[in-house]
Image (cartoon, rainbow, N blue to C red):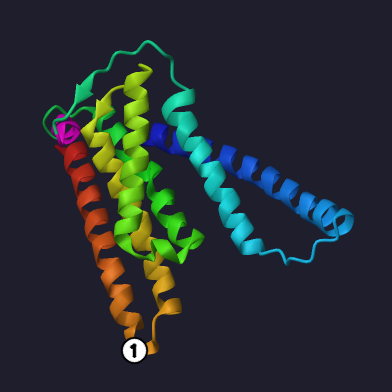
Amino acid sequence: MLTGMIDTISEYIIVGLIISSALYLLYLIVYFFVYKKLLHGKKALNLRKALIINIFTVYIFLVLYATMFARFSGITGGINLELFNSYKKALFRLSSSAWRDITLNIFMFVPFGFLLPLLSKFFYKPYFTVILSFLFTLSIETVQLIIKIGAFDLDDIFNNVLGAIMGYCLVMSLLSSGFNKEKNKTKYSFIYTVPLIIITLVFFGFYIFCNFK
């Protein structure tokens, strides 16, 4: 099961890197040969911001592909509003598919929470990242239900938002030393690191319990 999840994640990462590299190269060609030479543009290129935007764009495409475009229509999954239902299946029924879904749904949204603060300081505030991640996953679940390519599952929304929070805590713990005063560096890094450690320990504790029960 773990090998299958790693293979799935690795496959999407490789595809994402290939697409991202191609788009970034295209962006540089357009900037230097079209904007600078032909149009004589004067605006400087922010390579870091352009790269982040490019990665985020490809990431969103891959999420939409995995959750919608790669699925077959005609699936009538219905609506599941029972929170932690997938956890109960993984814990009490030892369901490998439930555990796989939990893991993939969490890790799928880690990049979302990680990249948003890099795109804009607007997302330094945690509630903006949480709200946007909630709206994004809610939209995906709703569309899946409407066009019949999956079920509307409350656990999926919870796990997606949890993954975004993990990504946010990770990136903010790295960025905290950059936008806070010296005396606050340790304080802010601690604030962002503790929730990440707690979630990670609970997650792997749950995994170990399920696999050795």
Q: Is residue 194 above or below residue 199?
A: below
Is 161 located above or below residue 40 in the figure? Answer: above
Is 140 on the left or on the right of 119, as rendered?
Answer: left
Q: Which residue is mark 1?
A: 183
Residue occupying the point 44% across, 56% down: 116
Residue 194 coordinates in the image, percent (x, y): 25, 67
Res 99 quadrant in image: top left
Where disc 1 sits, the SS reads helix
Q: Residue at x 39, y 53 (%)?
A: 113
Magenta part of the protein: which range?
A: 83-90
Nearest the viewer among 41 and 105 is 41
Kindly identify the amino acid type of the residue bearing the numbered disc 1.
Answer: Lys
Please tell me which residue lies in front, 188 or 9.
Answer: 188
Residue 104 horizontal/vertical position (percent): 35, 37
Relative side of 59 to 20, left or right? left
Q: Quadrant of the N terminus?
A: top left
Q: Who's the residue at 44% across and 50% down the image?
A: 111
Farthest residue, direction top: 74
